[in-house]
Image: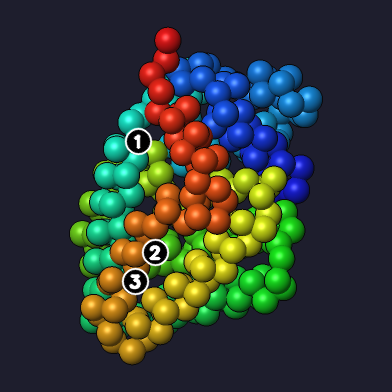
Amino acid sequence: MAEAEQKVLSDLRKMIMEGAIVAGEKISEVSVSQMLGVSRTPAKFALARLEMTGLIEKLPGRGYAVCSVKLEDIEKIIQLRGVLEGSAAGHMAMHGMSEEARKAFVYSLSVSGAITKKGSATVQDIEDYQAVNTLFHETVMDLCGNDYIPKVYDRIRHLPMAELGAVVPDLDRLAGEFMRMSIGHAQHTIIYEAISCGDAMRAEMVMREHSHATLDYARLFVGKDAVDKSIKTVTAKPS
């Protein structure tokens, strides 16, 4: 995604999180392009990404609506996703990874490692990291060797915060985002090493922690008040 499209994604997310666009409100490519003064192409990309994270939902015909969910629901969804991802990592460690999985892990870690060695992050770094972060999570789930785990996951992947590796960063807090990425890369490294060594228990436990901590890490590194305010806004019922 181009930097301009990432900026539109970040700005639109912030408008939803801060209540400028409230739960239940309808939005579209046209309305977003008008609000942000951009063309419909980056608006289209932003809406598609936000739908992946469960912040908005597609309406019949055209347009989207901001979702209304409860905070405890988001926490339960993240916990369930963590159980499934942990089970997938543990199964892969116990039964061995395929060559396809190994290559995907190595590539993901090489890119995320190069980014975290820089000491700071640009908008492009965040975009590049997110791509390989998603690759890492999808590899664990899709290539774990137990077809029933991804089948179960498919039944919840449309729920808010359930998409594998899907994160919409705050571009106004690049230092916090860099710290979050650094911790994520370190945990990915531990998970990969545990799978490689056949340590199923360690692979499962670290994968669960990594998945469960989505909100905790955001609060810690991006800002607790900002995250909690965002969640309260998104989870508020439409008037």
Horizontal and vertical percent position of residue 171: 68, 47
Residue under pointer 1: 71
- Residue most toward the front? 225
Q: Is residue 39 left or right of residue 55?
A: right
Percent coordinates x, y for residue 52 in the rendering: 47, 41
Alpha carbon separation for disc pair 2 and 3: 6 Å
Q: Residue furthest left?
A: 148
Mark 3 or 1: the one toward you: 1
Q: Are marks 2 and 3 in contact (CB under 8 Å)?
A: yes
In the foreground, 223 or 8: 223
Query: Who's the residue at 47% across and 27% down the image?
Result: 233
Q: Is residue 116 left or right of residue 215?
A: right
Query: Which residue is the site of mark 3?
Result: 206
Query: Which quarter of the figure has residue 234?
Result: top left
Rounded to the nearest whole Å, what is the CA distance between mark 3 and mark 1? Answer: 24 Å
User: What kind of element bears circle 2?
Assistant: helix
Q: Which label number is shown at residue 210?
A: 2
Say whether marks 1 and 2 touch (CB < 8 Å).
Answer: no
Quarter residue 157 falls in: top left
